[in-house]
């Protein structure tokens, strides 16, 4: 009984410690990769470069959400805000077969944001997700390839180069 009580106390302390770390050190910004677009690169150049790079890397462009257009249609002022969605269907299927919760992260998204007259590209930090996922060697390679592809797509957008 004493051992059980000791284990429960240790587990409780561990849970409190993790909650403290999450609350005080994990921020929304720490879960995202943000890259500033080079000065002089227009939004359409960013988009064209990203779509070209995605095709080159076999990342299917599956859609976008031009939120700024919807806001403007509602007579609301909005700088550029557009979400781009990419996916490799075979890789997605393998990940979801391992664990259906990966489906909540599909498709992979990169957002083009204009703030203070500057353009930025953002996406979820896949290193964070990969580090907590229980992936075998094959799936780890897939996850890393997807991460690297998304970074390459962002890098193309940042420079506006195909």
Image (spheres, rainbow, N blue to C red):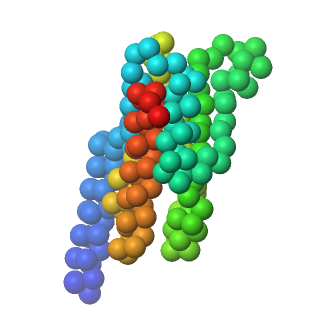
Instruction: Please state the total of marks drawn on the protein image.
Output: 0
The picture quadrant where one finds residue 118 is top left
Residue 49: image x %, image y %?
Answer: 51, 33
Residue at 53% of width from left, 71% of height from top? 94
Quadrant of the drawing holding the N terminus: bottom left
Q: Nearer the viewer, residue 13 or 108?
A: 108
Q: Is residue 122 left or right of residue 27?
A: right
Asked whether the viewer can see residue 28, the reply is no
Residue at 30% of width from left, 65% of height from top? 12
The picture quadrant where one finds residue 131 is bottom left
Q: Nearer the viewer, residue 123 or 145?
A: 145
In the depicted structure, whether residue 130 falls above or below residue 28: below
Residue at 51% of width from left, 74% of height from top? 98
Residue 72: image x %, image y %?
Answer: 72, 18
Q: Is residue 47 left or right of residue 161?
A: right
In the depicted structure, whether residue 143 falls above or below residue 31: below
Residue 5: image x %, image y %?
Answer: 26, 78
Residue 23: image x %, image y %?
Answer: 35, 45
In the depicted structure, whether residue 72 falls above or below residue 141: above
The picture quadrant where one finds residue 31 is top left
Q: Nearer the viewer, residue 80 or 20?
A: 80
Asked whether the viewer can see residue 51, the reply is yes
Q: Is residue 156 left or right of residue 105?
A: left
In the depicted structure, whether residue 129 falls above or below residue 34: below
Residue at 67% of width from left, 30% of height from top? 66
């Amino acid at each position: 009984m004493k051992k059980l009580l000791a284990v429960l106390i240790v587990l409780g302390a561990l849970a409190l410690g993790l909650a403290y770390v999450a609350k005080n050190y994990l921020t929304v910004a720490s879960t995202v990769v943000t890259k500033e677009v080079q000065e002089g690169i227009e939004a359409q150049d960013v988009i064209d470069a990203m779509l070209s790079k995605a095709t080159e890397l076999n990342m299917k462009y599956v859609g976008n959400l031009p939120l700024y257009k919807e806001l403007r249609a509602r007579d609301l002022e909005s700088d550029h805000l557009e979400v781009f969605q990419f996916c490799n269907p075979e890789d997605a299927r393998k990940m979801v077969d391992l664990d259906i919760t990966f489906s909540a992260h599909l498709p992979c998204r990169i957002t083009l944001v204009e703030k203070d007259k500057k353009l930025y590209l953002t996406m979820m930090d896949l290193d964070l997700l990969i580090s907590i996922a229980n992936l075998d060697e094959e799936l780890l390679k897939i996850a890393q390839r997807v991460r690297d592809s998304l970074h390459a797509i962002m890098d193309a957008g940042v420079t506006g180069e195909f």
